[in-house]
Image (spheres, rainbow, N blue to C red):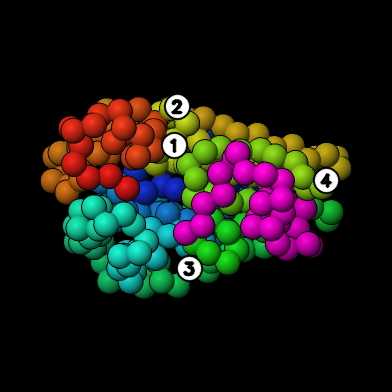
Amino acid sequence: MKLAIISDIHGNAAALEQVLEDIFNRNISDVIVLGDLVFRGPEPQKVLNMLRGTSALVVKGNTDEWVIRGIKKDEVPETDYEIMNLERLWTLDQITEEDIEYLDSLPTELSLNISETLSLHGFHATPKDLFEVVLPSESTDVFRAKIMTNPQASIYAYAHTHHPLLRYIDGKCIINPGGVGYTFDGFTQSSYAIAEEENGQLRVSIERVKYDVDRVVNMYEELGYPNAALMKHVLLHGIHPYEVKLKYKGTISHVV
């Protein structure tokens, strides 16, 4: 099996379209999606329609959960609670009740065999928590405790951080594909991973895909997105919203 691993699309249909085209051009037919399909992007329904038009296996992310049941005050900074709820309401206006039911039906983890000897455990953040952050800089012990919880798996695929990662611990492989909708590593191209077994050998790579960032940035303004100024900076610079606040102090009023 040759498997594409994508995540964190966040309603960015233009980026998803380019990533799916890249996957197709590589003759990859098996795809898994590790959550955060919508929220914070200009085309949530188009993203959902595109994904449901594929055979991809999809799990739920934390922003999908927010769209379904709302944002709790203790899940975001107090200063961002109001604007993030406006973003959620805007997203709900763009999608249907059927879309919400689809998001609600998604599992929180998946397991599959890549070959007779290699199995994968996939989830959004950690197997137990859609919101927990495990950064690439975390210690080996943290990865063992938070990510490598299924002893039967030989590959662990997680997302949520928007930072691409390949790491090997205890003879096992940990993959974070980064993000399709936007990444936080300063490189504005979309990121995804490929994993395959060939003649008994595991091959894993991180791929970057260019898309029209300027067109997506303009869509935030054209569609009246509630937090357009922040999200434009995130996409244009490939940085976390908190970094936007530090870099443009006084010009961005809300950040998450």
Residue 14, given in percent of the width and then of the height, sits at 34, 39
Residue 81, given in percent of the width and then of the height, sits at 25, 58
Q: What residue sits right under mark 3 in the picture?
A: 106
Three-letter code, disc 2: Phe
Q: What residue sits right under mark 1 in the picture?
A: 183
Q: What residue sits right under mark 4 in the picture?
A: 171
Question: Dot 1 surroundings within 10 Å: few (below 14), some, or many (20 or more)?
Answer: many
- Report the front residue among 194 and 129: 129
Identify the residue at image location x=31%, y=32%.
246
Three-letter code, disc 1: Thr
Q: For the residues marked 1 and 4, what is the alpha-carbon distance in whole angstroms?
A: 28 Å
- On residue 72, the disc is none
- Report the front residue among 6 and 31: 6
Mark 4 vs mark 3: in front: 4
- On residue 187, the disc is 2
Q: For the residues marked 1 and 2, what is the alpha-carbon distance in whole angstroms?
A: 7 Å
Magenta residues? Answer: 131-155
Three-letter code, disc 3: Leu
Label 1–label 4 contact, CB within 8 A: no
Magenta segment: does it hold 153?
Answer: yes
Mark 2 vs mark 3: in front: 2
Magenta segment: does it hold 166?
Answer: no
- Report the front residue among 235 and 43: 235
Identify the residue at image location x=40%, y=54%.
37
Where on the picture, by quarter, is residue 98? Answer: bottom left
Where on the picture, by quarter, is residue 220? Answer: top left
Q: Earlier in the sequence, mark 3 or mark 1?
A: 3
Residue 179 located left or right of residue 100: right
